[in-house]
Amino acid sequence: MDILKLLKTKVIPPDDASYVVSLVIEGLASDVESVFIKGLSRVKKVVLAKAFTKYGWVLAIYGAIGMTYKDLLLIYYNLENPRWTASALIHEAVHIGLGISRADTLDLINDETLAYVASFKSGMLDLYINSINYAVSTLSNCVKAYDEYDLSNIVVPRLIAHKLTNYEFKELLKLVDTDKASLIKLWLRSELSTHELRALATALKLIGLKIKELQKYACREVKESLGIAEYDFRYEGVDSSFLRMIKVLDKAAEDKERARKVLEPWWDELEDLKDLVDTYLDLRSGRLDMLKRILKDLRTNN
């Protein structure tokens, strides 16, 4: 199948698609192509969603730069650095193409790791290297800067994928089919620093995943950080316009009674998403209340 033709057919709107398509075509690793094509073939359209549009709001609400939504693949269009957009497209399409059932934590980690390997092999590793280094630094120092979801879905997969880019993608797929822990075992055979070993071992310990070969490297005790100090992936890979959407949503969540007034300028785009917006505001306002109570307790105790 002609991958360029497929991309031009699937990616909308056409005016925004050309540059992102060119980035994908130029960078996509040859051994990743078949899985990428399979993923694209399984969605109706790929929507490049800009800030303050209907699907831009969907992504902001979910705190994602790429996700499947009904029969669409939504990818945030980062106007300031479109390489993030291309990377997210590769990552999400490969997810869909792999079709891995997330029956347990190892399945989830393998699915995410392979998607990151695909992106990293396609020339996008430099976008993520700072977050990888940050994870190694914090976790190897026995500090928990992530919640369990981010550890399983983002941090652990990135740490593993970073060391697997020299392997053929098909080889990695075969290994996963043979042994669910094979990617971690392969990672262990790479050139690793003591910090990297401790970081991954500690991350796996925090999510309750026991890999015998790594357990001895994990921190015995991990220092908890306040939720407000956790690394927030909502701010990664996005432009200033996406951040403005986040600020608008946070402001709306501060006072649910005034939320509609705050969101009024964009209500034409949000009206079809009313139930999603309401659910988000309920969850977010509850989190803000919790953080305010924590800060109040800290001030009282100090």
Image (cartoon, grey):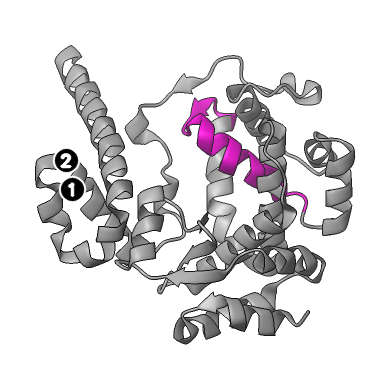
**Does the magenta portion include 63?**
no
> Any magenta on residue 151?
yes
Three-letter code for the amino acid on which mark 2 is drawn: Glu
The kind of residue on which mark 1 rests is Lys
Q: Is residue 221 left or right of residue 278?
A: right
Which of 264 and 91 lies nearest the eye of the viewer? 264
The answer to which image quadrant residue 153 occupies is top right
- Helix, strand or loop at label 1? It is helix
Q: Quadrant of residue 189?
A: top right
The quarter of the rendered structure image containing the C terminus is top left
Foreground of the two, 85 or 70: 70
Q: Which residues are magenta?
A: 140-164
Closer to the camera in the image, 107 or 204: 107
Q: Nearer the viewer, residue 174 or 155?
A: 174
Quadrant location of the N terminus in the rendered image:
bottom right
Q: Is residue 98 above or below residue 40?
A: above
Tell me, yes or no, if residue 194 can be seen here: no
Taking 58 as reference, is 260 left or right?
A: left
For image coordinates 30% across by 59% down, the residue present is 272
Report helix, strand or loop for mark 2: helix
Give left or right: position of 49 versus 252: right
Which residue is the site of mark 1?
251
Give me the C-alpha separation between circle 2 and circle 1: 5 Å
How far across and down, in percent of the image, does residue 55 sit?
Answer: 39, 63
- Residue at 23% over, 36% down: 285
Q: Is residue 221 above or below residue 236?
A: above
By secondary structure, the bulk of the magenta-drawn segment is best described as: helix
Read off the residue under disc 2.
254
